[in-house]
Amino acid sequence: MQHERKLPQLTGVMVASTIVALWIGSLAIVFALDVPALLPLEIVPIILARTFIQTGLFIVAHDAIHGSILPGYRRVNYWIGQFSLALYALLPYQKLAHHHWQHHLQPGRVGDPDFHDGVRDSFGAWYLKFMQEYLDFRQKVVLFFGMKVIFFTLFLGFHVPIANLFLFWVFPLVLSSVQLFLFGTYLPHRSQGRATPTSQHQNSHNAVSSNLPIVWSFLTCYHFGYHWEHHEYPSLPWYCLPSVRQHQPRFGKAEATPTTIARSGYLTNIIQSELQRAIVRG
């Protein structure tokens, strides 16, 4: 497949490392800020920037799941992905990998962990179901006590003000989860079941792509608005999705030709193989 040719081996590692470094460096900077001396118009951009970088950690883990950070080196992808998820919210990499491959196997329908329950498809109800899939009881306990330990270690041990912790760490984490859900799940897959048989929404991925320009696509969610392209070429990292979209003027419209049928079977085999790996290792 021409869009799945190998990228320079270290490109993904450099991109992932940059995002992780930005997260750590920006956190150190904002923790040292004198919040009472800041104006609200100064605080809001900082929160938004921290939210964007926070989301970037999850995107790094997502690319690791697809093996695109360092193609051909599964263990390197695993450790980078696990480290990114630990920084993001102490999330388990293997469980997320299993859920994500299940999403690719049954996108936008019941059976997809990221999809709604088949009945309640409002934004709020769907978001709560989405979060429950990733935060079971065990993970809620890990998150609650883990975040509490980190919070009080930073507050008591490093004297980081509570305002800084909430504004620039906790709040961006919550906003990031909403950002990922909105642009990576809700908008791309919400039309399933509402579209007509001739609509562009009717494709094997049950996904649509946004019409946002490249800059806005990047700022909203690292090009995950180009969602049909991601499902069609899952091994490509996020920063390559715009190049695919430029060559896919009929995105989201699947036609039953020998080529598309073969492509669908090819993707299904890859997804089932990766899902089986996740189950065995989990």
Image (tube, helix red, strand yellow):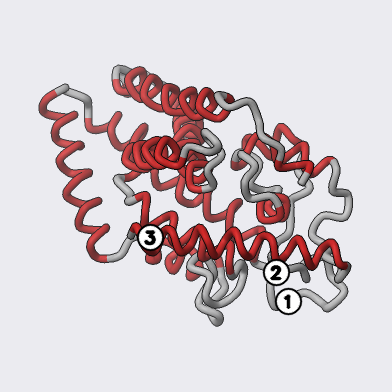
If the image is split into quadrants, where does the C terminus sit? bottom left
Q: Residue at x 45, y 64 (%)?
A: 276
What numbered label is drawn on residue 134?
Answer: 3
- Residue at image mark 2: 191
Q: Earlier in the sequence, mark 3 or mark 2?
A: 3
Contact? badges 2 and 1 (CB < 8 Å): yes
> Which three-letter amino acid code belongs to the residue tagged 2?
Ser
Q: Residues within 10 Å of mark 1 (few under 14, many from 20)?
A: few
Q: Residue at x 34, y 37 (%)?
A: 83
- Residue at image mark 1: 194
- Residue 171 visible in the picture: no
Q: Earlier in the sequence, mark 3 or mark 1?
A: 3
- Residue 247 x %, y %: 85, 43
Camera-nearest residue between 187 and 282: 282
Please tell me whether mark 3 or mark 2 is closer to you in this view: 3
Please tell me whether mark 3 or mark 1 is closer to you in this view: 3
Dot 2 falls on a residue whose secondary structure is loop
Q: Residue at x 84, y 48 (%)?
A: 248
Q: Residue at x 52, y 49 (%)?
A: 180
- Residue 220 visible in the picture: yes
- Residue 139 x %, y %: 26, 58
> Which three-letter amino acid code belongs to the residue tagged 1?
Arg
Dot 3 falls on a residue whose secondary structure is helix
Give the image quarter of residue 269.
bottom right
- Residue 93 x %, y %: 37, 49
Q: Residues within 10 Å of mark 3 (few under 14, many from 20)?
A: some
